[in-house]
Amino acid sequence: MNTGMKITAFAAALAATFGTAYGVGKGVGPVVAAEERPAARHDTPHGEEEHETPATPHGEHETAAGRRAPGGLQISEGGHTLALQPSALAAGTPGELRFRITDAHGRPVTAYEREHGKELHLVLASRDLTVYRHLHPVRGADGTWSTPVELPEAGDYRAFADFTPAGGEALTLGADLAVSGAYRPAALPAPGRVAEVDGYRVELAGAPAPGRASELTLRVSRGGRPVTDLQPYLGAYGHLVALRAGDLAYLHVHPHEGPAGPEVSFTATAPSAGAYRLFLDFKHDGKVRTAAFTVHAH
């Protein structure tokens, strides 16, 4: 989040976004007690029944050619639109973000499937991929969603709404968001295999590969000791979102079933070669923390 300085005021919304790792779906199902935990299996896509074959990651949609396209690149899809309401957001200042999901007739959607305990998951990411937030807004009776938010840096952001309308298909819609203040453009963080957050060390093994499934394993430790008592967060021991540098194409998968650490594993497919930013949310000692990595798919 560094380099060069310029002052600019932001406002308005656009659309353009990514491919393999953090929307919200049925995944491998909720975390259960050790004695009830089923054998490990692959992730199940949002809104679909379980299959033995590898799942289609959350945040993707079917193209005319039958391939899966990245989610979050469109503000409208499947007759639904993400409509951000005017928000005067300033860097470093508490604010509120409001939006609606509207149907093909422009009416606000008020009925959703619950996925991992929530009707809708909202992800905010800065265009330079140095700021990331995973939020759970509250829906009013009129279909308006709202959430408090404080973003530390000015600049252009992307808002991703990950949801399944009642009786419909899972969708990830994206819209641009501007945050006013002193803008310091930053380079994409350098690639790395280790992230440090709040005294925790998270090590990444594996990398996404374009067009094919690959295994990603993240190992959590603290003070040199493996963390073996991760806590369930939204029904899983970890959540991973991947955003492609440039257009912020979005992908979210859930982990394979397994013990409560120290390792959490995922299967992911990158939509193309290039640089990606991975964000792992995990919960321990009652607090959710996020570890971030830059990787290259090739």
Image: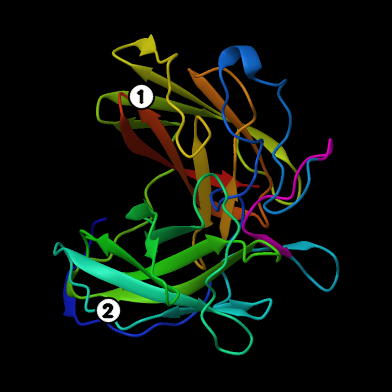
The residue to which callout 1 is attached is 201
Name the residue located 86 percent from the left edge and 70 percent from the top edge.
65
| Quarter placement of the N terminus | bottom left
Residue 172: give x, y in percent of width and height.
58, 64
Q: CB atoms at circles 1 and 2 under 8 Å apart? A: no
Which amino acid does the dot numbered 1 rest on?
Arg
Task: Place residue 47 in its image quadrant.
Answer: bottom right
Q: For the residue carrying disc 1, how many other residues have a C-alpha within 10 Å: few (<14), some (14-19), or many (20+)? A: many
Residue 20: give x, y in percent of width and height.
61, 51
Q: Please state which of residues 122 and 139 is positioned toward the viewer in this rendering.
A: 139
In the image, the segment drawn in magenta is 51-61
Q: Quick check: 62 above or below 88?
A: above
The residue to which callout 2 is attached is 87
Among the two numbered marks 1 and 2 on one chain, the one whose residue lies closer to the N terminus: 2
Q: Which colouring convention does the figure follow? A: rainbow
Residue 21, which numbered label? none
Q: Nearer the viewer, mark 1 or mark 2?
A: 2
Q: Is residue 72 left or right of residue 47?
A: left
